[in-house]
Image (cartoon, helix red, strand yellow):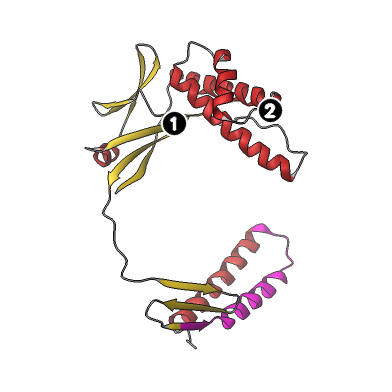
Amino acid sequence: MLATKAVRQKYQASPELLKLLDELRRMVNVCVMIGIEQNISSLKALASRTYPCLSRDILAYYRLGAISAATGIIHNHRKANKKSPRTKLPCAKKLMLSIWYGFKIQNGHLRLPLKSGQYAHVKLNGHKLQALSGLEVRSVTLTSESLSISYSKEATEIAPEGYVGIDRNLNNVTTASIDKMVRRYDLSKVTDTKSTYRHVKSRFQRNDARIRTRVFSKYGEKQGTVYNRYFTACPRE
């Protein structure tokens, strides 16, 4: 079974990468505007309408990535608009790109295509290189300050020995296992403790953020101590 994981690293984007990220953000917003104006929500329809409008200086898979990102933004806007018709028109604000093709890890660097025959290089640290060694890299996502590299890795599936069902309520938790063992844990004291400390903290009137933080932290620790002591010897019914 293949599992998909990712490693993340901070970096400082070069001027060339920042320019590319800014251009991609602009293209996403162009696609969003066209999609909303023409009432387009499907990826295929949006691509056919917007692809000719995007800069030909940008590589094709970056343009397709911008269209895909715009489709997601339009879908989210439609959902929000159903709940509230006053929803503002969306736009991409964050500098970000995702790429599935054209990149390569070479000589300790991540090589990203900028234009035909032009590349940007990001140095990877030793830990990330070791984590990616011998694995299939699937995609790369970059912002102006960090990069994330996803990869697929063979994972051993673990067969469970049994199953446990858990039913949580305000004052109790009930568990049932496949061997027909049912247990009920009384948590009423936890509810009472939380209510008591909430009442105590609500009586604090002084308008001083530092003292308020100190007092709330103190009672939070006391509340946590009571919880831990109670859970250690939690009564079963």
Mark 2, secondary structure of its residue: loop
- Number of marks in picture: 2
Residue bearing the label numbered 2: 39
**Magenta span of residues:** 183-209
Please provide percent x and percent y for residue 144.
48, 29
Mark 1, other Cα within 10 Å: few <14 / some 14–19 / many ≥20: many
Along the viewing direction, whichever of 88 and 203 lies nearer the viewer: 88
Q: Residue at x 58, y 21 (%)?
A: 26
Q: Amino acid at mark 2?
A: Asn
Disc 1 to disc 2, how far (Cα)? 30 Å
Residue 11 in the image: above or below residue 175:
above
* Horizontal side of residue 3 vs 59, given as left or right: left
Q: Mark 1 — residue?
A: 142
Q: Is residue 9 above or below residue 154?
A: above
Is any atom of residue 18 visible in this view?
no
94 left or right of 1 in image: right
> What amino acid does circle 1 point to?
Leu
Looking at the image, is 96 positioned above or below residue 53?
Answer: below
The x, y position of residue 69, in whole percent, is 54, 30
Compare residues 202 and 76 and report the one nearer the observer. 76
